[in-house]
Image (cartoon, rainbow, N blue to C red):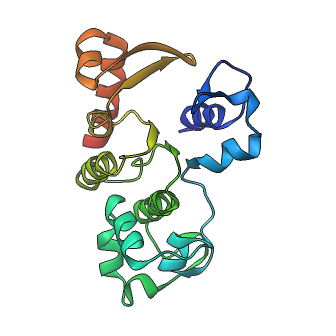
Amino acid sequence: PVESEAVVDRLGRYAESAVTWGGVRLDEIALAQVRERILVADNEADLFAGTLRELISGRREHDEEAVARAVRAAAADDIVLGLPDGLDSDVAAQGRSLSGGQRQRVRLARALLADPEVLLAVEPTSALDAHTEAAVAARLRAARSGRTTVVTSTSPLMLDQVDTVHFLVDGKVAASGSHHELLDGEPAYRALVARDTEEVLR
């Protein structure tokens, strides 16, 4: 997770480069405008006391359909159904009345509802069981239309759902391809993913 946060932090920051956005060089676009379009979703983002709806919606008003889509995309339906008043149930500050996995999905739902042009998700399924993780991975893929989504993860369930995997070694891209291509051709990648699988099975 620490390495993942470092990678995403660098991706989310402005840096001089030849990278363009809509045909315009990044160094010609105001930093504030760049950051308005990029959202970093991490597992330490604050959750203030309030209703579940307020935690997910933040300071903006959203219609019921948009909130429901975000909740479903984050596989958080069961959280809503399990609370006495659903989305209008009170949640303690920092989500202390929720489990770690529930807090993770609430944060993901909030990020998805914000609908950024670029979503950078740091280990979005690290606190989830395999069944829930598989649901999040599949739904996150289905909800990616119209948005660039960058996910840092070593989970095979997540990696199997992405379009392209970039395997980083010492902060540099060592190989790129599909999950299965890298499993077949990169022993170091295969070992990393296998270790993650073993930890899930323990």
- Residue 60 image offset from top left, x and y in percent: 59, 73
Compared with 91, 13 (above or below) is above
Write the residue at 58% across / 49% down. Answer: 39
> Horizontally, is 45 left or right of 89 in the view?
right
Q: Kindly indicate the quadrant of the structure image that contains residue 155.
A: top left
Write the residue at 34% across / 52% down. Answer: 143
> Horizontally, is 168 left or right of 136 in the view?
right
Q: Is residue 202 visible?
A: no
Write the residue at 61% across / 32% down. Answer: 11
Compared with 97, 147 (above or below) is above
- Residue 126 image offset from top left, x and y in percent: 41, 47
- Residue 58 image offset from top left, x and y in percent: 59, 71
- Residue 140 image offset from top left, x and y in percent: 34, 49
Q: Residue furthest front?
A: 23
Compared with 80, 131 (above or below) is above
Q: Kindly indicate the quadrant of the structure image that contains residue 27.
A: top right
Compared with 167, 199 (above or below) is below
Write the residue at 46% across / 57% down. Answer: 112
- 58 or 187, which lies in front? 58
- 124 or 162, which lies in front? 162
* The C terminus: image quadrant: top left
